[in-house]
Structure formats: C-alpha cells, structure tokens
Amino acid sequence: MMDIQQLDKKYVLPTYARADVEFVSGKNARLTDANGKEYIDFTSGIAVVSVGHGNERLTNALCEQTKKLIHMSNLYYTAPQALAAKKIVEASGYDMKCFFGNSGAEANEGAIKIARKYGEKDGVPKRYKIITLDHSFHGRTITTVKATGQESMHNYFGPFPDGFVYAKDIDEVESLLDDHTVAVMIELVQGEGGVQPQDKQKVQELVKLLQSKDILVIVDEVQTGVYRTGKFLASNLYEIEPDIISLAKGVGGGVPVGVVMTSKKDIFSPGDHGSTFGGNFLSTTAVCEVLDILNEYDASGALSDGIAYFDAALEKFYNNHTNLFTAKVGLGMMCGLRVKDSETLSAIIKNAQENGVMVLKAGRNTLRFLPPLTITKEEIDEGFKALESAVSKL
Ligand SMILES: *Cc1c(COP(=O)(O)O)cnc(C)c1O
C-alpha cells in the first residue's frame, strides 16, 4: 500500500500543517488511527461531527436516501430541503427563510449578498458597508477573508471587495457607523479568534441600536449554531433577534452544508443567488436527521447534562494546572483554556495526541475543546485522564 503521507505530500496542495496521524474510523467521541491506536475526540472535526462519529441514525438515513437520489437540481423541488428549512426555522424560533449552500464561507457570502441587496435602492448601492470585529473569522473566500478582522489573513490576495470596516470590539461599533453602513456581522462566541464570548448586555444594546437605525444584524453562527453553546442558536442564548444568521459546521453532522437564514424573506428573486450542490438530497437528509437527533437529545436533558459534566471536568483540569493556564473561556460545548505561552500550547496539543486525546488550538493562545455534542461521561473522563498524563509530561 502506498504511504498516505507521501501521497498527500506529493499530490495535495500544502495549505494545512497536518499533525502526524491518519484516522480510519470512529464511534461517537472515539477515534481509531491507521495503526489501531485509539483516541478520545475533543475536536469533532472542528465542531462539525455534532452527533458523533458513526452515528447510526445519521448513517442509516444517508444510506436510505442515497439509494433513491443523491442529487437532482434546484430547478426542481427537493423534499428534504423543504423539510430541513422547516426544522431549522422552527428550532430557531425566528420568522425566517433559509438558503442552502455548502460551507460556512458560502453561508456568509449569502449573508453579505442579502445585506448588500438590502442596502440597494432602485439598483443603486446606497448603503454597502459591513462592520466586523477584530479577531473574527468569517471564511476563506476572497470576500469572507476580507470580512475577517485579522490583518494576517489579508496578505497576497488583493484587490479585495470594498466596504468592510473593522471594529476593535463591540464597544467601538457605534463610532464607526455612517450613512453607508448596511450591516454589522459578529460571532457571539469568537471561535477561531480564541473561544471568546461577547458580553450579553453589550450585544443586546448594540442590536437595539442597530435595528433602530435599520442596520442589519448578521450573526455568524457557523460554529456557535446547532446547540454548540447549549441552545439551538447562540442568538437564542443572547436573547436577540438577528436579521441574518449563517450556519454550517455542525448542521450536517459531517456532510458539507451551509445555511443562511433571514427575516428579510422577500430579499431575493429567482436568479439573485444560487448553488449547484446546495440543499441537495444528500446534504439536507443529513440536516433533517441531525436536527431530529439533537432536538431529542436537548429535550431529554442529555445535552445540558453533558455540558455540565464536561464543564466540571474542564474546571477541575484548569484548577489542577494554574501554572499552565490563565483563564477558562467559552460557552456550552465550545470551551477553551488560555495557555500562558504558545510553546506550552503546542506542547500540550502534541502530548495530548500521543496520550490518546485530540484537542485544538485557537487564536490568543487558547487550547480549544469542541467535543461531539453527544459525548458520554465515560468518554469525557477518559479524555481528561489522557490530558492529565499529557500535561504531566511537560
Ligand atoms: C469555520 C467558520 C467559518 C468558515 O466555514 P467554512 O465551512 O470553513 O467555510 C466561518 N465563520 C465561522 C465563525 C467559523 O467558525
């Protein structure tokens, strides 16, 4: 058999600094690599595998659907797409409609297009500026990379689309508003930027101000959405009603799906936006099953139990190692520990892998935890046991 690492190095563009491991199978929060070694997964493929690896209900639903149709086209009706939209809208509690794409960046592109069209009157762009925050992350396309408030991501790829303005933080947004501002896009918990939750009261005040000025509130829930913070949406937890919400990562349980939903239900006419793959039978069957699984998991109390158990384990781990960690951050199953320096952070991640637990890194020296939402108490215990041995070897 050809060595996979060599094949990858020879044929795949080197856009990722890959860790030295190749996974071959998984069950809920357990993973097995090509050498048969087992791991506890505190990453869920970066908040994607929300219902766990190898989820039987999800794989059965996908198998059944793929035997019938995987894809036709958005030129025709697709039953699971309409059903998935209904489930998403109902779970959100907002009066909205959905558009289906294939990724978080694409969902945010849709959000930006909705805002730009909203700012247009009689075919002329009257308002086009979109304010985003420093340390934000909104995607990797030319437009969403520009929307991302991180200078280091704006190397090489210009010229970029105009009209993105960065606020240092929520407090600075108001001073940046002008007659051209059409929207403000925020993450309620900045994920890539370091698992940093926004202050609830400040967010509520900002939303009130913006909506009084007819400036759209876009909440990027690509990472926070679909129960990651304990509620269906972080917007529910923050008790706000955004105008536009983007979802992706966890909504398909691993099948690529991006969703943008908006209360501006008449904003688009046929031809304004589209996607070949978006919302096809495969991906929206995944959404329907993932939402059924997680709605039940939430209603039964299992989700909040799991979150409380994980939080207690993390708190204990944090308190055991105040020499390494300076703060515990996050919400729900989106947690982090600020590490005293980046060398220590890298060493923890490497040792963790050797000791059989997968963890992530995020900006601002953060050790990041994004377990499957269905992680069991046994898996949590095992993962933290492995982490204890990992840090004892530092
Ligand atoms: C991951 C992420 C994105 C980008 O999603 P892709 O599917 O990689 O395009 C956008 N916004 C947030 C908040 C994210 O966490």
Image (spheres, helix red, strand yellow):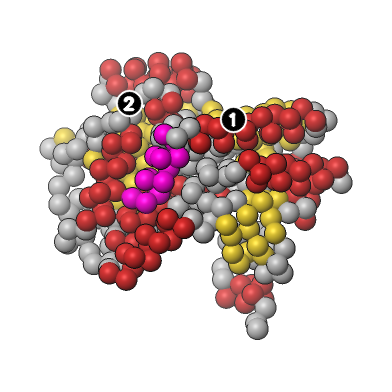
Q: Is residue 253 above or below residue 322?
A: below
Residue at the front extreme, as displayed: 300
Q: Is residue 368 left or right of residue 107?
A: right
Residue drawn at 67 percent across, 69 percent down:
34
Which residue appears at 41% of the width and 40% of the height?
296
Placement of 296 over or under 58, stated as above or below: above
Residue 85 on the magenta segment: no
Q: Nearer the viewer, residue 244 or 140?
A: 244
Q: Which mark is residue 308?
A: 1
Q: Nearer the viewer, mark 2 or mark 1?
A: 1
The picture quadrant where one finds residue 117 is top left
Mark 2 and mark 1: Cα distance apart in space? 26 Å
Look at 22% across and 56% down and name the residue there: 79
Residue at the right extreme of this rendering: 393
Magenta range: 288-299
**Residue 369 to residue 81: above or below:** above
Q: First in sequence, mark 2 or 1: give its number.
A: 2
Q: Amino acid at mark 1?
A: Ala
Q: Quadrant of residue 298?
A: top left
State the count of labels: 2
Residue 86, how many percent across, how many down? Answer: 25, 43
Closer-to-camera residue (238/153): 238
Residue indicated by mark 2 = 241
Q: Is residue 187 visible?
A: no
Circles 2 and 1: CB distance less than 8 Å? no
Mark 1: secondary structure: helix
Residue 49's label in the rendered image is none
The spot of residue 14 in percent (x, y) is: 60, 65
